[in-house]
Image (cartoon, rainbow, N blue to C red):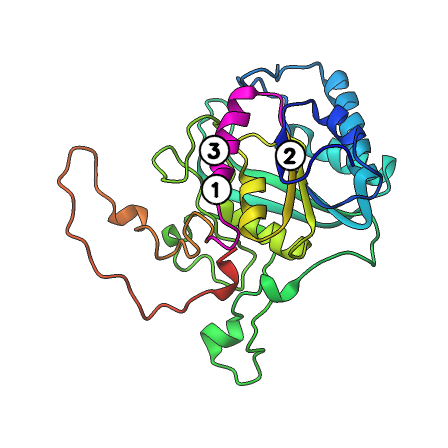
């Protein structure tokens, strides 16, 4: 392996991965350009569809090569190419889809001639359908038997979360429960403390935390071919994994290196581990121009969700 680990490298990801030994990476998380015309620093996000898919095939080929036989690949992608990506990964590269996760969020793209975009796709792919890392104890949430029914037969460790992740569940107090098909992660809005300000598509640390905890073990190597704002690497370092990233933009590289320098392994993840009590429901907010409401005490009787601190 020629690319030094625990670093982000200013190089095209295909070239960077070609320098890595076959079967040397435990977990890959990729959030590539969606080919929707986003204004990146150096990359042109408006390829012809055939060219975009050919390029996608080239970098995924390298991902599959560098993954260990029991390795895991998570891919974040939008609607436009989700179907093609899934077919490509399964049919061309022989990967197995363990989960097709929907990450739902509010404050999405405001559209004029279609329903507003409020979700992204997260594909959980593995090379070997029987041999792969999935740390269930790290990501469990309380079950309905625990929270609702007080059933003594309930597993005290809770249950695995389902495959839809929802932000701001406080707006739907009766619509989503901890054991429903929801994962709660605040979107990294412009006013959030963790927002770096150099990249418009910054992923929440809590979301990457769940993926990295579930799909790798401490000391293993986590790679991100499209480092961007560096969330994957930052969370990997906090969770005591080795990390490796590739990024074309020198501006992003500078911001990521500064972010990583401020992290000590074992640090807490940024973002609220329990968003149901971290922010008020929309109805309890204040209208533009109105005076702030007096703060009300947080409901400490609300059950904690031990699986959602990732």
Which residue appears farthest toward the bottom when viewing the image?
Answer: 152
Q: In this view of the protein, which residue sits in the foreground, 179 or 123?
A: 123
Marks 1 and 3, the one that precedes in the sequence: 1
Find the magenta span and give its range: 247-267
Could one spot residue 80 in this view of the protein? yes
Badge 3 marks a residue whose secondary structure is: helix
The residue positioned 51% from the left and 21% from the top of the image is: 251
Please give left or right for residue 135 compared with residue 250 in the image: right
State if disc 2 and disc 3 touch (CB < 8 Å). Answer: no
Tag of residue 309: none
Q: Earlier in the sequence, mark 3 or mark 2?
A: 2
* Disc 1 to disc 2: CB gap under 8 Å: no
Asked whether residue 75 is in view, the answer is no
User: In the rendered image of this protein, does residue 61 appear above or below residue 150?
Assistant: above
User: How many marks do you count on the picture?
Assistant: 3
- Between label 1 and label 3, give the one nearer the viewer: 3
Mark 1 and mark 2 lie on one chain; the one further toward the N terminus is: 1
State the residue at coordinates (76%, 28%): 59
Cα–Cα gap, marks 1 and 3: 28 Å
Between 239 and 206, the one lying in front of the other is: 239
Q: What x and y, as percent, mark residue 294? A: 15, 51
Residue at the spot 76% in from the left edge and 22% down from the top edge: 55
Q: Mark 2 sits on what residue? A: 245
Distance, label 1 to label 2, CA atoms, is 26 Å
Front tag of 1 and 2: 2
Q: Quick one: SS at disc 1?
A: strand
Q: Pointer 1: what residue? A: 105
Q: Is 69 covered by the magenta stretch?
A: no
Q: Which residue is mark 3?
A: 258
Image coordinates for residue 226, horizontal then vertical, percent = 63, 30
């Amino acid at each position: 392996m020629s690319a030094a680990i625990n670093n982000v490298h200013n190089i095209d990801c295909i070239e960077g991965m070609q320098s890595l030994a076959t079967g040397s990476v435990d977990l890959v998380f990729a959030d590539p350009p969606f080919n929707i015309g986003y204004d990146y620093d150096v990359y042109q996000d408006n390829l012809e569809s055939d060219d975009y898919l050919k390029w996608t095939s080239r970098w995924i080929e390298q991902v599959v090569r560098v993954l260990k036989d029991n390795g895991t690949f998570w891919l974040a992608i939008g609607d436009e190419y989700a179907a093609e990506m899934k077919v490509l990964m399964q049919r061309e590269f022989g990967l197995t889809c363990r989960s097709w996760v929907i990450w739902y969020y509010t404050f999405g793209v405001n559209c004029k001639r279609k329903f507003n975009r409020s979700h992204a796709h997260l594909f959980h792919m593995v090379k070997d359908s029987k041999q792969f890392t999935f740390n269930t104890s790290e990501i469990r949430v309380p079950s309905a038997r625990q929270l609702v029914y007080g059933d003594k037969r309930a597993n005290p460790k809770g249950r695995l979360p389902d495959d839809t992740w929802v932000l701001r569940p406080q707006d739907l107090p009766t619509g989503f429960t901890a054991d429903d098909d929801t994962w709660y992660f605040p979107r990294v809005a412009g006013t959030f403390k963790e927002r770096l300000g150099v990249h418009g598509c910054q992923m929440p640390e809590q979301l990457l935390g769940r993926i990295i905890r579930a799909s790798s073990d401490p000391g293993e190597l986590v790679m991100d071919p499209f480092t961007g704002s560096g969330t994957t690497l930052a969370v990997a370092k906090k969770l005591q994994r080795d990390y490796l990233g590739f990024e074309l933009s020198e501006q992003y590289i500078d911001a990521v290196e500064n972010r990583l320098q401020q992290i000590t392994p074992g640090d807490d993840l940024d973002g609220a581990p329990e968003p149901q009590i971290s922010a008020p429901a929309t109805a309890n907010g204040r209208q533009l121009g109105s005076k702030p409401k007096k703060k009300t005490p947080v409901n400490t009787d609300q059950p904690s969700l031990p699986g959602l601190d990732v």
